[in-house]
Image: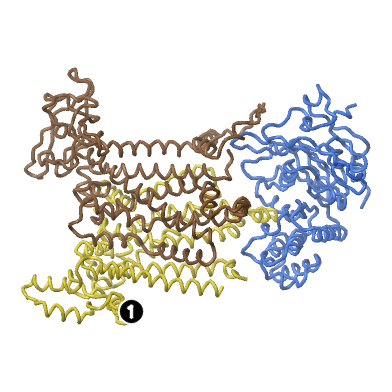
Chain colours: A blue, B brown, C yellow
Amino acid sequence: MTTKNKLDKETSILEVRGLKTYFYTADGIVRAVDGVDLDIFPKRTLGIVGESGCGKSITTKSILRLIDHPGRIIEGQVNLKGDTPKDTVDITQLKNNGTQLRQIRGGRISMIFQEPMTSFSPIHTVGNQITEAIRLHSNLDKIEANELAEDWLIRVGMSNPSQRLKQYAFELSGGQRQRAMIAMALCTNPDVLIADEPTTALDVTTQAQVLDLLKEMQEKNGMSIIMITHDLGVIAELADDVSVMYLGKVVESGTIRQVFKNPKHPYTQALLSSIPSLATGHRERLPILTGTIPHPQARPKGCPFNPRCKDFIEGTCEISFPEQEIIEEGHLVNCHLYNK
Amino acid sequence: MNYLSRIKNRLLNKNDIPEEIEEPIIQDDVSIQIATQRQLIWRRFKRHRLGFASAIVVLLFYVLVLFADFFSTSLPVKYGAARGFMPPQGIQFFEEGHFLSVCKVNGERDMESFLMVHTQDCNVRESITLFGKGYEYKLWGLFKTERHLFGMTNPDANADEWIHIMGTDKQGRDVYSRLMHGTRVSLTIGLIGVALSIVFGIFIGSISGYYGGLIDSLLQRFIEIIRSVPTIPLYMGFSSAFPEDWTINQVYFMITIIISLFAWTDLARVIRGRFLSLRDEDFVVAARLNGASTMRVVFVHMLPSFYSHVIAQASLALPLMIITETSLSYLGLGLRPPAVSYGVLLKDAQNVQAVAHTPWLFLPGVAVIVVILALNFMGDGIRDAADPYQEV
Amino acid sequence: MLNFLLRRTVFMFVALFAVSVISFFIINLPKGDYVTAYIAQLQATGSLVDAEEAINLRKFYGLDRPLYIQYFKWIWQVIAEQNLGFSFEYNQPVTVVIAERLLLTVILAIATVIFIWIVAIPIGIISAVKQYSIWDYIFTFLGFIGLAIPDFMIALIMMYLFFVWFDFSPGGLFSPEYAQAAWSWGRLKDLIEHMYLPIVVLGTAGTASLIRITRANLLDELAKPYVVTARAKGLSEWKVIAKYPVRIALNPAISLTAYILPFLISGSVIVGVVLSLPTVGPMLVKALVAQDMYLGGGIILLIGFMTVIGTFISDLLLLWIDPRIRFEGE
């Protein structure tokens, strides 16, 4: 874990600025991602946390331009840094499905998904799909790619790797599938791995194994990880930095220590205090976050959290979205409470 | 944005995003939350414009079925060689002081082609009264009346000799009136056939789905066998075996039954599927644990969950029945003259040369196409509306 | 996999049996039996048959035995001796009468299936990939119309259009000089030239169905996560579609073939009548109208057999294509 200077934009490997992805549906416009900034640094893990529907998945899919009709990226930059400053590429500007974009996908930025069963093609073998990834991003021939695939399966701790290569996804167990998925994502040595709720569908034991595997891979390969989850425990274990999202906007971001020890945004505070712990007094009620996520077409004006906020300031919070404030170096929050 | 506006936007290249986007304010729509399932389905169905419009068309057709005689101008069997192959005759508005009237049509046989040639002589005309009098008939077999949509003002003039809105066929029979009656026959066979299929389908489908296991397997194989044999040759075989001396009604009845015998399989499969998935639902188990009898569980608890699917499936089966009857009668193996149905009517249009010279004989074909399309669209609309996974 | 194979084979035989029973039932449906018709024919040509001779004839043909014995005798005849009985109309054994017609019916059916595949699958794919585009709507609409209009009407409309536009009455499968000739390359070529109209007419409903199904299935598959994964790996768009979803969406296409085969055969009967094709259809109509029951029943039997066997073959194809079925039951 390297120390970082968040304000030093030079060391980040991937940065997202002002990303807006809207969906033009028959019932109206859904602003799934509404002006999101992210910084991803080498060898560090960024956790993106928030309730279902806050836009975390769409954000990362937008990074890889995997957004389909009726969704569109309408604004923003996704800058992937290269060896020299001149090599920076704005992914949003690349030609859709063009060669450059396809080289980045799977090559420099890989993604693993929540449901490994449905993420593998049902009619191709696991080996076929892994070697496909390898050969898309290298010049290896079939035999060499196969060897490399088997090598990776060993690295992710898969039993009987040579046999697994010839099997189909439905023949593997949940944990094995997730390992295979990780192998498939990492076999091209990407700079960034996006993990979209990779442990949500797994039982607790397998979950722990997968998280350990990810940590191990990060140490050995030195890649960055963007981890999306709604499980604060996973974040606490794996992440170095965290961004909290609500209704398409980032409301607080910083290192784990900063945000978890000293949460500033009322939403973050509510999330953290709703975790039951051994410290909660006997028969004490868990604090609940009142209200529910609003209807996508009925977003509150101003700060989107205002109807549920315990620190709601009348006359301010429902009028405008708060500017970004720096609490301390690296710790940022968007909340009217901290307006200087 | 519905399909049409989407197409319009594409064509006009409207890809720009409007500058200021108004935030729509949605109150919690209370009416949605307390609507019954039937109301929800009705709402969704109304939004499906094509389906809804088609349903209206279908309704209109069935009005014709109910009031076939009322709409007709002549008995379908009434013929007259002198009026053979008369082209459709126009009805004039506001001529010579009559609101509606028709010109006299004189027919002569052309000596070279032996075809009847008809000319209109508008010096001789008769006036038409709406809701006027015509031939006597029994409305729905109950009430005697002489009222028709088009009747002659002059009591000495016969509607069946003067009015031929869609022309006549080879024997001088009024195509329009025959179309009305044909609609009645074809559409009722379809309806009765569907009703029978529903009964078979529900019966077998529910047994299959509810009990599962061996019974289900056997019934499913049985259904597969029925589905794997080509139906038309079988229908043909069966109907050719009807004795010559059967009355029209007997033939009609048997054809309906025969067609239903094979048509219930789709419905049974859908119902079975639903039963299988519902069987393990908690509310069904709860009902059984409460001591409800099987009958009660099936009819009170399970059936209401999918009666909308049954309706959707039935409305998609109806056009198939109509097509089958039409095809059979067209081949001469279904209903035969003097019965009138779409198939019988189209049999007259079999000869291509004839159709080229007397295209109005093909009008029943148009009616068939329209009613079948309408039924299909309507069925699709109902099916989409009944789909529980759709948004309100 | 063996499980699947076994089940389908057993099922096929049961279906064949059912078809034969139904056909036998149809043959015996009209009043009177073979001997009655035979006697009537003899009488028409002047010979007389007295009551005793009639009884002997019946004994000879086994018609005095119970129905199920008759059935076994008949089915034995069909399978072991390839004897389908005698046709009164043509005064020849049924097999002779229908042989070539049956062949042409089979050729037509297979050709139509191939046509449907070639046309419907690409259109279905384009429709799904370019969803909401103008092509999608056009194809969907056309497909709908094709489904809704009965086969014979399409045939009539096409004939009418040909007559009006090209002043030519299409009909039959051969030009006059080849109609009765023996088989040769020339005849084959002539057949192919004439086949396109019947194929198009016959295939319309099937094509419409398949387009709809392919499109729907492909849309379903394209929305699935593994497609996103493939794209996220950097696979080019057309490879994503070709390698993954298409293969899966192809399965329903094959199952559909099994499903529509009976309809195709049914349809070919009707279309054969309208277009006056030398296939089994027109012959069946005439036979049934004339109550020439061995001919009629024989045709129905053979058609039924063809359909069941065709269904079985497409089940085999499905097995070959979909690895998931191979593992069924594991």
Q: Nearer the viewer, residue C238 or A28?
A: A28
Query: How many marks do you count on the picture?
Result: 1
Question: Residue A137 occupies which quadrant of the picture?
Answer: bottom right
Residue where numbered disc 1 is placed: C79
> Identity of the amino acid at label 1?
Ile
Q: Residue at x 87, y 52 (%)?
A: A237
Q: Nearer the viewer, residue B25 or A87?
A: B25
Q: Position of residue B343 (x, y in %)?
A: 27, 49
Q: Position of residue C268 (x, y in %)?
A: 32, 60
Q: Quick check: B320 left or right of A275?
A: left
Q: Helix, strand or loop at disc 1?
A: helix
User: Compared with residue C263, is residue A40 higher up or lower down, i.e. above or below?
Assistant: above
Label 1 lies in what chain?
A: C
User: Compared with residue C195, is residue C74 higher up or lower down, i.e. above or below?
Assistant: below
Q: Position of residue B215 (x, y in %)?
A: 50, 65
Q: Position of residue B151 (x, y in %)?
A: 20, 28
Q: Residue furthest front?
A: B291
Q: Residue at x 32, y 48 (%)?
A: B189
